[in-house]
Image (cartoon, rainbow, N blue to C red):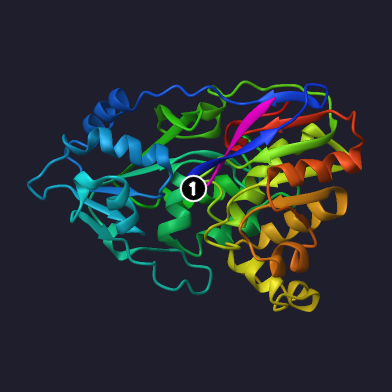
Amino acid sequence: MEIWVPYGDVESLLTLQAENLGELFDPVPEEHAEELGQILVERIKGLERLVVCDLRPSTLKLLRAAASHLPQDGTLKLYARAPKGVEDGVPELKGRVLKLSPPPASTAGDVTFSPELVGGTSFVLSTGEPDPLFGYVDARVSLGLVAMGGARKAAYLSRGGDGPSFLEETPARAAMVSLAERLGGAQFGTVVTKGGEPFSLIEGSEGDARAHFTAQQVAPAKGIVVGAGGRGYDDSFSQALRLSLGAIKGVRRGGEVLLIGECREGIGSEALQMQTSGRLNEAALRRGFYADGMEEVTYLNWLKENYSVTLLSTLPELYSSGSFRFRTAKNSADAIQKILASTGRGAKVHVFTRASETLLA
């Protein structure tokens, strides 16, 4: 059987014999970009700013649908951390997207906002995704990640434990939401996807998002294949790692995990980069040292301790097999051969093409 798994801007062809395919979790695309574009236009009427928090295809498609209806008289300013990325994805907005400055350095536990967002009214837009620390990343959490200095650390310190949680109200998410709501005059919109396409626009909360997911039960197999979701979801190893954990219930402890993610932007978080270069040690951790993405070090170590992981990506071998101690593969066929060589030729393998749309009961 041929299965296409998103990989950056393209797809990776995965071929499995019928006797080896367990359950296939491959969301069917269902797009409502045009009607959601009209809803977005209505919701931002009278507001001063539209803040775009990510470059996921669903966010950009929604913006394309709304672009021709956005005010042209300068009464609405558009901000993003990566203006060029937004303009490349939505050519109709070329020359209109302003740079959202990094927030000022946070001191003594204070949380700061990017200066362009202070005062006035804003609409904050992002695409949502399940997350092991926050339970669900909606527009409020996304605002904290891109425009609030000190918010990620505050959320990390508020976590209830190091184990991953998905589509739950976690202490880390509650902390982030509380901080985001300090931005007076802000409204929030989170895109929910189906098959990678814009499906719904919700105000927020993991409860609203959960209504769009079907919790599925599956008997753990000897192996799983996990695709993070392609461009916008597998840009870095950090993203692919966080999303892969949502499917981990589908494999037995000690089983084989094939993680498919392009990682065109490299490793990702500051904490993972420090670990791969040997700059993050046990002594520093005991002293309470913090770097953005510190929770990912725990997730990575837990994954390596409990499963055999093969990584299909563009990361250099120095990181994949050296620092992470993963097996690597030249292509998907090579990866599947390695999986089956370990599990046995008759073993069942579950496949998750988009971990960002997966909820296992």
Which residue is at the front of the view, 244 or 299? 244
Q: Amino acid at mark 1?
A: Val
Q: Is residue 167 left or right of residue 70?
A: right
Q: Magenta stretch containing residue 7, yes or no?
A: yes
- Residue 165 at least partly seen: no
Q: Residues within 10 Å of mark 1 (few under 14, many from 20)?
A: many
User: The N terminus lies in which quarter of the figure?
Assistant: top right
Residue segment shown in magenta: 1-8
* Up-down relation of residue 331 to residue 95 (above or below): above
* Up-down relation of residue 107 to residue 160 (above or below): below
In the picture of the structure, the residue carrying the numbered disc 1 is 141
Question: Which quadrant holds residue 255?
Answer: top right
- x, y percent for residue 125: 36, 42
Total labels: the figure holds 1
- x, y percent for residue 56: 43, 44
User: The C terminus lies in which quarter of the figure?
Assistant: top right
- x, y percent for residue 329: 73, 52
Q: Magenta stretch containing residue 178, yes or no?
A: no
Which residue is at the front of the view, 244 or 21? 21
Which residue lies at the image location 23% right of the left edge and 47% below the top edge?
Answer: 91
Q: Is residue 298 left or right of residue 207?
A: right
- Residue 232 at least partly seen: yes
Q: Is residue 207 left or right of residue 219?
A: left
Which residue lies at the image location 53% right of the left edge and 53% below the top edge?
Answer: 235
What is the magenta segment's predominant secondary structure?
strand
- x, y percent for residue 40: 28, 32
- Which secondary structure lies at badge 1? helix
Question: Which quadrant holds residue 217?
Answer: top right
